[in-house]
Amino acid sequence: MDLNHYLELFIEESKEHLQTINDELLKLEAEPENLTVIQEIFRSAHTLKGMAGSMGFEDLASLTHQMENVLDMLRNAKLKITSEIMDCIFQCVDLIETMVDSIEQGGDGKADVSEVVMKLELIQDPSRAGHLNPINREAAATQKLLVDEYQLSVIDEAKKTGNHLYQMTITLDEKCIMKSVRAYMVFQAAEEFGEIIQTQPAVDQIEEENFEQSFTLLLLSESGIQDIQKQLLNISEVKEVIVIEKTTQELEKNRKSAARDEGNPTQSNNNSSGEKKKPRSKSIRVDIDKLDQLMNLFSELIIDRGRLEQISRSSQILELSETVEHMTRISTDLQGLILNMRMVPVEQVFNRFPRMVRDLAKELDKKVHLSVAGEETELDRTVIDEIGDPLVHLLRNALDHGLETTEERIAAGKPEEGNVLLKAYTSGNHVFIEVADDGKGINRDKVLHKGLERGIVSQEEAKKLTDQQVYSLIFSSGFSTADTISDISGRGVGLDVVKTKIESLGGSIMIQSTPGKGSIFRIQLPLTLSIILSMLVKVEEETYAIPFSSIVEITKITKEQIATIHGQKVIQFRGQVVPLVFLKEIFHVPSVENHFAGEGLFIVIVKRGEQTAGLVVDSVLGQQEVVLKSLGGYLNNIYAISGATILGNGEVALIIDSNQFIQ
Amino acid sequence: MDMLKIVAFKIGNEEYGFDINQVQSIERIQPITRVPNAPAFVKGVMNLRGNVTPIIDLSKKLNLGETQFTESTRIIMTRLEEIELGWIVDKTSDCLDVPQEALETVSSTVLNREYFSSIAKYEGRLIILLKLEELMKPEIT
């Protein structure tokens, strides 16, 4: 069996299950009596085991198997949850995670599981350490296969169409550890030939490995004995396959004798497929490149749509404008869909943090409560993939450096438990992710001192630095204010990596800190590759687009309304003093002769957080949906330009990043 | 055997060339949008089949003065390490197969420009081969 093309699916699903297990384990820790939670964990562990087994990852399968046994005992109240058991299961999950990662990276997923397996066994049976076999319940001994009325009729029907009925006894190798998995593979192979009518012991028993070395099944098939035998023997660890052709009469006899023996339950066949029926939405995996292509093609369509709209407006043909309107509606939906496909909720990244924080808090011996907010905030997939590591660094930093020790907290009159808040939200065309703690805050003098010591700033510079600038020193490479180097953070490598990463994503990072109250690390990320509603404005002969999300209002003023404060031109607008930004000057727009100087000035008021600024433009063309395109790798960091877009006439207009005007 | 395929073009009266492996296409001049606060040799950006592509005035980049657009002005599109750029040239001449022997390394005494890789002598013509990777390096300002 070639399993390679199932591998990706396997990895994906394993990760999903691991995530579920992790989540539920945390829940379980909070409420150890909750049986449904254990059930959930058990189910995921069971599926995981099955998948690992069928993919041939023996270590992984045997580990999950032991874990499952423990969970089973917990489920049946044969064991009580203790923190030791929890730790052991967590350890087990970590190991599984490492193995899955290794498989993902092309490894063989092998790892030394014996230690954890031992621990798990000890939990199961403290008296009998080291014994490998799981408790074998009374194995079914009878070799007689029992069929019911319905199955008999199926067999009769099948015989008429040229099928043979075979009774097969399959014996597995003694050394086979994952018997259920081999059995499963046998089933799969057998099903290639025909239909499995009945098994002995029943399928669910086989799955739980409640059989010795062999099991029997009834198969309806058109193939010959030899073919089947050969195929089944190909499965590794199958020792022997005996195939006998059966007649209905023999079965009939069996059935009658069984009728008297009421204690023997008859189980219908093949509910192994029922095991997989989990309510999960169907999905396919699509290459990101393909989505990019789709997006590119779609943006071409948007450009054409813009052109069509123009034509229909000017030509005033009713039929045309109706069609264009319809097309507009459809393409709007389509656009939402395409963008959506690329957007992933940050939850995907966030949901591994509760677990991490728990472990870290234990390690640091601090009491920490992590609250997560805004996990539904969506980000472009490419950004999601990259944002995990920086956030890990920031969280570690918050726990290790931000929060005080329990004693310190009590001394400072704070609640024992430290709070860390992880929050995501959208504002304008940016997504913000904050990591806030209520710890001791950043010590300005200490940071400055360190900065001087490490030669990152000079004495003269140091005097002029604002708080914000001082804080950002901790992002310099080779900087660490922790007095002792700890395992978790404090090697002075973390934070500068964070900054570099965020910046490579086109984002920025800011620190807010109040001594004694805590600090907030705020990451600002662009919503890359998206279609944004923007206002097209003209400055002389050049057209620029200003994203709608940052615009507050557009107003027209006369030149007399402009005042000057300390050399800065400002206007008063709705009781606020708004500084003016003359795009013509900032962008050095060449003057066009015969340019008609209007009476007033158009001011586009933009905001960033609480602050505002007024962008002075010559005229306002109107709003339009534009496709944000990057200027390419060559032109990066152009001041106040976040990208470009293609207008209806095919020309390129630059998109203004008004955030940069407001510092 | 060792032939180098080059795309030859003219800037003023001088002939230059790019390695053909780096050239994507040759385009006519289309409307170019100026990018404010970009280096002076960046003419702007252009819509090339849906992609916004930076366009560079090669003549200005080589300190030969600004290109005046004429009927024969073309843009040579290049691609290097995922970055696509357009280079404005006065005129494209042709594609040539130049044998390795006809290439002469630029002696540092005559032309010490880091942008030149070698000079090809081909049927009496002198073609200066440009190093795209050097041309694309950001200038330290």
Image (cartoon, coloured by chain):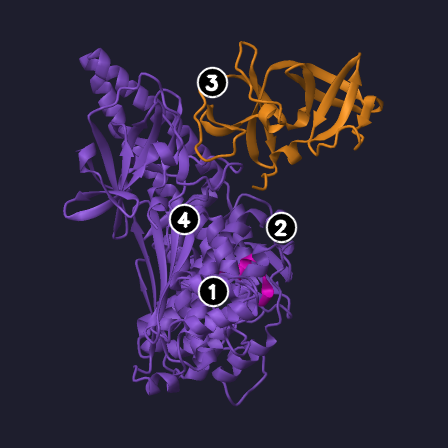
Chain colours: A purple, B orange
Q: How crowded is mark 2: few (under 14 residues within 10 Å), some or many (20 or more)?
A: some
Other-residue count near label 1 (Cα within 10 Å), few / some / many at <14 / 14–19 / ≥20: some
> Residue A601: horizontal and vertical position, in percent?
23, 31
Distance between the alpha carbons at the discs numbered 2 and 1: 78 Å
Q: Is mark 3 on a helix, strand or loop?
A: loop
Q: In this view, does A261 lie to the left or right of A218?
A: left
| Tag of residue A462 | 1
Residue for badge 2: A231
Subunit of label 4: A
Q: What stretch is highlighted in magenta?
A: A50-59
Say which quarter of the image contains residue A267: bottom left
- Residue at image position (30%, 23%) is A306
Amino acid carrying mark 4 in the image: Val
Q: Quadrant of residue A510?
A: bottom left
Q: Distance between the residues labelled 3 and 1?
A: 50 Å
Above or below A463: residue B97: above
Q: Mark 3 points at which residue?
A: B30
